């Protein structure tokens, strides 16, 4: 049975997770499962609550997480570029007069707007990645 089916998991702090069991009778079983599966040392408290102290993350793990973050960010950038490329293809058809009801001026304005929106999305992604990197590498 998955853990989320028996209780609610809340990360209280970077060094503590708390599992509130829906049925207090299964708290002992949850403690044993966490101990065996994750090799952590949980403590059962009254009311079916299990507190799980989490070890500090090593620098090596942080660096691996940072690499994964950069890979995900690059995949996101590629998706943005693909969307922009498809949109610009439609705009190009409009500029060439191959789409009915769209003037060349409208197509040109749309192209500029697509570029602006794409640039904003790239900047937002970069700021999010920088912010997340700071939180990952913070000790």
Image: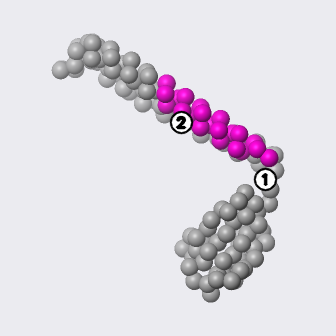
Whether the magenta-drawn stretch holds residue 106 is answered as: no
- Gap in angstroms between the C-alphas marked 1 and 2: 26 Å
Q: Is residue 124 magenta?
A: yes
Residue at coordinates 70% horizontally, 44% vertically from top-left?
A: 135
Image height of 34 relative to 69, above or below: below
Where is residue 38? Give x, y as percent: 73, 67
Residue at image position (55%, 28%) is: 123
Q: Is residue 88 above or below residue 21?
A: above
Provide the secondary structure element on which disc 1 rests: loop
| Residue 103 position in % (x across, y down) | 22, 15
Q: Secondary structure at mark 2?
A: helix
- Circle 1 sits on which residue? 57
Range of magenta residues: 119-139
- Principal SS element in the magenta part? helix
Number of callouts: 2
Residue 74 falls in image quadrant: top right
Asked if residue 112 is positioned above or below residue 30 in the image, the reply reads: above
* Res. 2 visible in picture: no
Q: Measured from the top left, where is residue 58 in percent x and y?
A: 81, 50
- Please say if the residues under marks 1 and 2 sit with CB atoms less than 8 Å apart: no
Nearer the viewer's eye, disc 1 or disc 2? Answer: 1
Q: Which mark is residue 76?
A: 2
Figure check: 41 above or below 105:
below
Q: Residue at 71% across / 39% down in the picture?
A: 134
Q: Quadrant of the N terminus?
A: bottom right
């Amino acid at each position: 049975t998955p853990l989320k089916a028996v209780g609610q998991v809340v990360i209280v702090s970077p060094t503590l997770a708390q599992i509130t069991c829906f049925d207090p009778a299964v708290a002992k079983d949850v403690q044993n499962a966490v101990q065996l599966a994750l090799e952590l040392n949980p403590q059962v408290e009254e009311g079916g609550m299990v507190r799980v102290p989490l070890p500090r993350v090593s620098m090596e793990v942080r660096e691996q997480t940072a690499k994964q973050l950069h890979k995900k960010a690059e995949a996101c950038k590629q998706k943005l570029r693909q969307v922009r490329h498809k949109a610009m293809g439609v705009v190009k058809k409009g500029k060439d007069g191959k789409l009915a009801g769209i003037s060349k001026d409208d197509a040109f304005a749309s192209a500029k707007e697509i570029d602006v929106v794409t640039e904003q999305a790239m900047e937002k992604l970069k700021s999010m990645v920088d912010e997340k990197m700071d939180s990952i590498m913070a000790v």
